[in-house]
Image (cartoon, grey):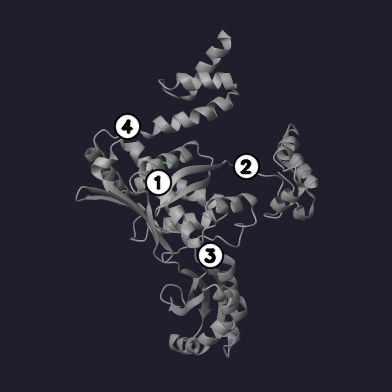
Amino acid sequence: MIKPISGFSKLNKLEKIEWLIKNSFSSNNNVKNILQQYSNDDAKLQKLHDEFAENTLTNFYLPFAVAPNFLINNKQYTIPMVTEESSVIAAASKAAKFWLDKGGFKAKVISTTKIGQVHFIYKGDFQTLNEYFEIIKPKLFSDVISLTTNMSKRGGGVKDIQLVNLNDQIENYFQLKATFDTQDAMGANFINSCLEQFSKTLKGNYEDSSRIEIIMSILSNYVPDCIVKAEVSCNIEELKDRSIINPMVFAENFVRAVNIAQVDKYRAVTHNKGIMNGIDAVVIATGNDFRAVESGAHAYASKSGSYRSLTRAYVKNNIFNFSIEVPLALGTVGGLTKLHPLANLALEMLENPNARDLMKITAVAGLAQNFAAIKSLITTGIQHGHMKMHLINMLNKLEASDKEKEKAINHFKTNTVSHLNVDVFINKLRTND
Ligand code: MEV
């Protein structure tokens, strides 16, 4: 068992690495080299990274890729995407190209309200609490003016505060439920700071403050009123391409596939996972909080009481329609967005969008990803494309040379990709050489 350590964060980087090698590795082998290899030579940049998180030892790299040819509201974008999954970028790019000559994607922001709560216990009757809340409400707003001034100048701020009675669910449990407009910021820090001040004002001004016990003050990552919609549509005949021989059959099966994800949660989770392949990749590339987006999206997928698809598809009057509605609390200022050099670059690539435009672009990436996945699933099957992309990973694991890779890629154009087959193929090449 590892002896617990106190003051680990106070050690310098080398001391931390040495402690780690001593306590978590059976041999010193290559630990230090690997950690140093992924450290940046540029000391200033590395210091910036080190300060993003406590106890940073090095950097964990993921591919920063781009998917070109996205036409969104008649404007063309190359979308930055960060993901480790081989097929995601190829799928996004293919879907973008597919819709490019069909009018592209249309997207609109439906709402941008975010929510935060002060959870508290009040030992007394609700009517008295409610009367107190009505009296204190203007002060709740005025006490956060120093926090909200800048946000107000940009058109945002605290929109409303309500008192919620949840006494029937947990004894004496109430909430201040506040709504916020955080403009181009994701707004977590702004919301949480306001909430903490609300809790002080709420408790501090009550004549017998011991009756109010603040449990916690925190934003909600469930943002059903911060919604963006993206869609594509075209005449059924226009769907025809190399893998879509019969567009009508394709459209019908596509709609069925989406409907299956509406009624069956096992399929819905995988279906939505595919959507998040696209969404997360943009969220990460632009320095946003993918955990917040993930939890919010999945909660929204369950808003009916059952977990369902985030996308919908239907055919009407010979037109194929496919759309997504998803909550996306994103920022283009604050957080890491401008601080992380690559997030900053990603935003510049998108022509420095405001949060609303980034919501649209991100929703489109999710819709495109879902389109590509379903298209493959109901035509060639997913493994066709997946294993082709995964082949390179397998070859790299076998430390294949460029020449071996070239031969393998050629061979597996017409042969089934599997670990065993790739292994056998490379071994054969090596014994014949
Ligand atoms: C794989 O990462 C994502 C898919 O499974 C999504 C789906 O099944 O719709 C291909």
Q: Position of residue 2 (x, y in %)?
A: 72, 45
Q: Which mark is residue 61?
A: 2
Q: Nearer the viewer, mark 1 or mark 4?
A: 4
Q: Nearer the viewer, mark 1 or mark 2?
A: 1
Q: Secondary structure at mark 3?
A: loop
Would you name the residue on which mark 4 appears?
A: 242
Callout 3 crowding tier (Cα within 10 Å): few <14, some 14–19, many ≥20:
many
Would you name the residue on which mark 1 appears?
A: 368
Q: Nearer the viewer, residue 232 or 261?
A: 232
Callout 2 crowding tier (Cα within 10 Å): few <14, some 14–19, many ≥20:
few
> Residue 139 is drawn in which quadrant?
bottom right
Q: CA distance from mark 1 to mark 2?
A: 25 Å
What amino acid type should be assigned to the residue bearing mark 4?
Arg
Q: CA distance from mark 1 to mark 4?
A: 18 Å
> Residue 304 is drawn in which quadrant?
bottom left
> Residue 59 is drawn in which quadrant?
top right
Q: Nearer the viewer, residue 36 or 405?
A: 405
- Name the residue rendered at 58%, 22% in the picture: 402
